[in-house]
Amino acid sequence: MGCMMKTGADYAWFENDFPDIAEAYCFTLVRGLAPAEVVSRLEGHPEEPLHGITAVVDAAFAQFDSAEGDRQLVAMTAVGAWTLLVEPDGYLGVTEERALPASAGTSWISHFVNINGVGTFLWAENQVLRLCFDLMFPDDRWGTTPDELLDVLQRIGFHFGEETPETDPSSLAAFALAEHLADVAITPGLLTETTFACATVRTQ
């Protein structure tokens, strides 16, 4: 893991530069599996690759409309020893019934936000849920090691206590927490310059 721990503030660019996906997304990091293997575990159907996150977002919404919500587009790329899985307006990565089986023999780190600002962070290791919590309510955590990262959560920018600030940094702090666990940074260049492998996956 890197020497300098990033905070949610280090990811402020995401909402500023990528408003189309920042409203609703799920980002998942899976260790040691190629994109094709992640697709297989999710029982997905390979699709044509797409260059850049804007094309991915456009295709994801077109897919949602054509399939009436039964299947969704996911985009993937290898980042070091990990595969990054991006779901515009999706949530498979934080759905325990899908994520836990898919995490067999590996690490699965995922965070999700929907258009209403509701969000979830999920960390699984080899089909065991290590940590899960609502981004707005990090005091309420569950999993086998819910308190292992408590100090990290506080330093990264999750808000604890009764009062929530007007500008809550929790969604951005989730990027920093995922980076802390995986030592993989999501960057503007990664989102704009990558040609993503794509697939469609059933939503239920």
Image (cartoon, helix red, strand yellow):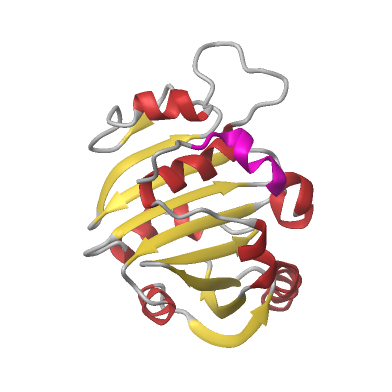
Which x, y percent locates residue 178?
45, 46
Could you tell me which residue is drawn at 38 percent across and 80 percent down? Answer: 40
Question: Is residue 197 at least partly visible in the picture?
Answer: yes
* Most foreground residue, 72 or 175: 175
Question: Is residue 138 at least partly visible in the picture?
Answer: no
Specify whether residue 8 is painted magenta.
yes
Specify whether residue 23 is painted magenta.
no
Q: Is residue 15 left or right of residue 42?
A: right
- Residue, far top: 162
Q: Is residue 161 left or right of residue 196?
A: left
Choose top left, top right, bottom left or bottom right for residue 39.
bottom left
Q: Which residues are magenta?
A: 6-14
Placement of 92 over or under 160, stated as above or below? below
Choose top left, top right, bottom left or bottom right for residue 126.
bottom left
Which x, y percent locates residue 19?
78, 51
Question: Overall secondary structure of the magenta stretch?
Answer: helix
* Most foreground residue, 20 or 115: 20
Could you tell me which residue is drawn at 71 percent across and 45 percent down? Answer: 13
Could you tell me which residue is drawn at 77 percent across and 52 percent down? Answer: 17
Which x, y percent locates residue 128?
24, 50
Q: Is residue 204 left or right of residue 165?
A: left
Placement of 10 over or under 198, stated as above or below? above
Which x, y percent locates residue 194?
62, 73
